[in-house]
Image: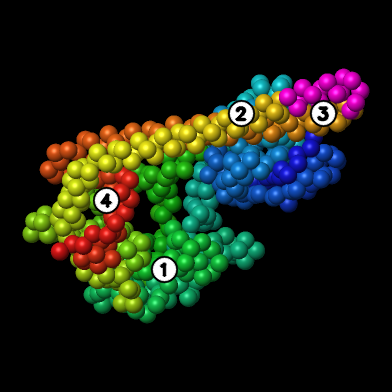
């Protein structure tokens, strides 16, 4: 089998569910097994190879960096073959496994090989329909069993003083296995970060509030947990590339309420919503396991308890969507962050928005004032009414755009279909030449495979263009209907804003730019 201009993906996975992994399950040995297999198959040796791996990820879902890269290559139609040690390395979810091996990979013309399962879709694609789901079911059951055993083992290790944890708070770092003491301690203090934690507690004990503490840390240019992790070569928590991270009240509160800083470890506070689920939920407090003096303390237990007594009723929380009409719609035009909503006790007309960056970082170039929610809503209502008045022209523009897009899509489809017909004719011609003895069987099979692959690629593109055309038409219809539905609008609600407004950019109290979901696009609006 030849895969011209296509990549052979060697995929490896080792997860935490593989308890006490043997030599045969290590990434290195998966690599060795796959490379030996490739060397023994001439049709694979000449292919360009790409290695993708996930070390420490479960096989019960596809939320893995390596798999995501594989899927990106698959969507770009760049993969000719995927090879793994066995089915379970690719997935332990038997439904998804069967879906990819029996439907998606064959449709995309991708060869799939699971070495230890003696499966090669080039030869077993027709007969493997029953075996794959069966093996997948066994893998799924194995994952559930391992998950339960793993939780029980971890809890027992904690009770015995041999600690284990999957996350480390700011101020701590993981102890390498070879460096652990007899108690198998995983935590050790990272002095550079710990000094920042101690400063936070000292400032809190002196009576400073969370916002004031955040300002002090920003003025001192103390790195946030996300920035610190990135400086150490990791990925910042939720930070975009080159995005500036600042201290805020929530970061301060999170540290001040974390019992680990006094040496107390809580296990079982959060749990997975289900096997293979990426969602984490809080477990009942009765199931928590708390162990005092379990890890090195950064601050004293007395200081920690004093802080909790000083602020006994502080609770973490964020405003929910329903708290204001412009939720996740209004951003700072300078830093790009969502503006914070500040409700007023004096009445709704005084509710406002502000940029947290400007209030917590004295060097910030973001606007430093407050912009009233009422002013934004009045502006939006005024502009929407004007757009409705011009809806006739907008509808004509939409219809014109729609006709153009439909014509372009139909032209692309016709071109692709003609290309398919040409290749189908070429297949028939190759067969006639083979029967006439003009070409060898090998030449015929090579041409046939190449033409079949090209036909499949063209058919996929035809379907993509059709889907894009239908989606575009539906969007235009919805747009026209949306505008016509606001003829007599008197007051904005969340539904109207969600339907018409994409983003509101605030550059200053009197300078606002609105990005709309209808054809007008975006334009600046001066608030006076």
Q: Which residue is mark 3?
A: 445
Q: Are marks 1 and 3 in contact (CB under 8 Å)?
A: no
Query: Depth-wise, is mark 1 or mark 2 nearer the camera?
Result: 2
Residue at the spot of label 2: 417
Q: Residues within 10 Å of mark 2 (few under 14, many from 20)?
A: some
Q: Give me the C-alpha separation between circle 4 and circle 2.
A: 46 Å
Query: According to the image, label 4 marks what residue?
Result: 327
Q: Is residue 129 visible?
A: yes
Count residues near mark 1 (Cα–Cα under 10 Å), then give few for <14, some for 14-19, many for 20+: few
Q: Helix, strand or loop at disc 1?
A: loop
Pinpoint residue 516: horizontal percent, then vertical percent. 30, 49
Q: Residue furthest bottom?
A: 220
In reply to whether residue 371 is colored magenta, the answer given is: no
Q: Are marks 2 and 3 in contact (CB under 8 Å)?
A: no
User: Which x, y percent locates residue 196?
Assistant: 40, 74
In primary-sequence order, the first of circles 4 and 2 is 4
Q: Earlier in the sequence, mark 2 or mark 3?
A: 2
The image quadrant where one finds the C terminus is bottom left
Quadrant assignment, res 358: bottom left
Neighbor class of circle 4 (other Cα within 10 Å; few <14, some 14-19, many 20+) is some
Residue placed at 75% from the left, 39% from the top?
A: 3
Checking the image for residue 244, the label placed there is 1
In primary-sequence order, the first of circles 4 and 3 is: 4
């Amino acid at each position: 089998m030849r895969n011209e201009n296509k990549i052979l993906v060697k995929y490896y996975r080792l997860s935490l569910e593989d308890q006490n992994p043997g030599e045969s399950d290590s990434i290195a040995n998966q690599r060795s097994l796959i490379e030996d297999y490739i060397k023994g198959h001439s049709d694979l040796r000449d292919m360009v190879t790409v290695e993708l791996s996930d070390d420490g990820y479960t096989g019960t879902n596809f939320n893995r960096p390596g798999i995501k890269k594989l899927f990106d290559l698959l969507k770009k139609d760049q993969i000719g073959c995927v090879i793994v040690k066995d089915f379970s390395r690719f997935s332990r979810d038997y439904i998804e496994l069967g879906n990819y091996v029996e439907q998606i990979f064959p449709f995309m013309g991708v060869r799939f090989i699971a070495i230890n399962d003696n499966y090669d879709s080039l030869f077993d694609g027709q007969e493997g329909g029953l075996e794959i789901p069966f093996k997948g079911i066994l893998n799924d059951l194995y994952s559930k069993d391992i998950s339960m055993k793993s939780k029980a083992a971890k809890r027992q290790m904690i009770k015995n003083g041999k600690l284990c944890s999957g996350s480390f708070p700011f101020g701590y770092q993981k102890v390498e296995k070879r460096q652990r003491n007899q108690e198998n301690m995983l935590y050790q203090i990272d002095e550079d970060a710990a000094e920042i934690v101690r400063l936070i507690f000292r400032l809190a004990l002196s009576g400073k509030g969370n916002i004031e503490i955040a300002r002090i840390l920003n003025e001192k240019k103390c790195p946030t947990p996300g920035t610190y992790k990135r400086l150490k070569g990791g990925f910042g928590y939720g930070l975009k590339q080159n995005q500036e991270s600042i201290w805020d009240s929530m970061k301060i509160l999170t540290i001040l309420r974390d019992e680990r800083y006094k040496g107390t470890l809580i296990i079982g506070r959060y749990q997975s919503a289900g096997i293979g689920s990426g969602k984490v939920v809080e477990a009942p407090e009765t199931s928590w396991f708390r162990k005092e003096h379990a890890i090195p303390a950064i601050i004293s237990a007395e200081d920690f308890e004093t802080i909790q007594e000083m602020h006994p009723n502080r609770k973490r929380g964020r405003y929910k969507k329903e708290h204001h009409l412009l939720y996740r719609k209004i951003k700072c035009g300078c830093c790009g962050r969502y503006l914070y909503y500040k409700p007023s006790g004096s009445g709704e007309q005084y509710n406002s928005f502000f940029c947290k960056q400007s209030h917590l970082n004295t060097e910030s170039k973001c606007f430093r004032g407050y912009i009233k929610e009422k002013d934004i809503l009045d502006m939006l209502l005024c502009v929407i009414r004007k757009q409705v008045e011009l809806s006739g022209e907008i509808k004509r523009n939409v219809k014109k755009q729609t006709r153009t897009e439909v014509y372009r899509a139909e032209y692309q489809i016709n071109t692709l279909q003609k290309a398919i017909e040409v290749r189908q004719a070429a297949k028939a011609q190759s067969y006639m030449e083979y029967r006439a003895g003009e070409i060898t069987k090998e030449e015929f099979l090579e041409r046939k495979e190449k033409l079949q692959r090209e036909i499949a690629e063209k058919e996929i593109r035809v379907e993509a263009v059709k889907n894009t055309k239908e989606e575009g038409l539906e969007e235009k219809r919805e747009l026209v209907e949306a505008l016509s539905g606001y003829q007599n609008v008197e007051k904005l609600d969340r539904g109207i804003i969600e339907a018409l407004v994409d983003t509101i950019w605030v550059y200053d109290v009197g300078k606002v730019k609105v990005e709309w979901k209808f054809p007008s696009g975006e334009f600046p609006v001066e608030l006076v």
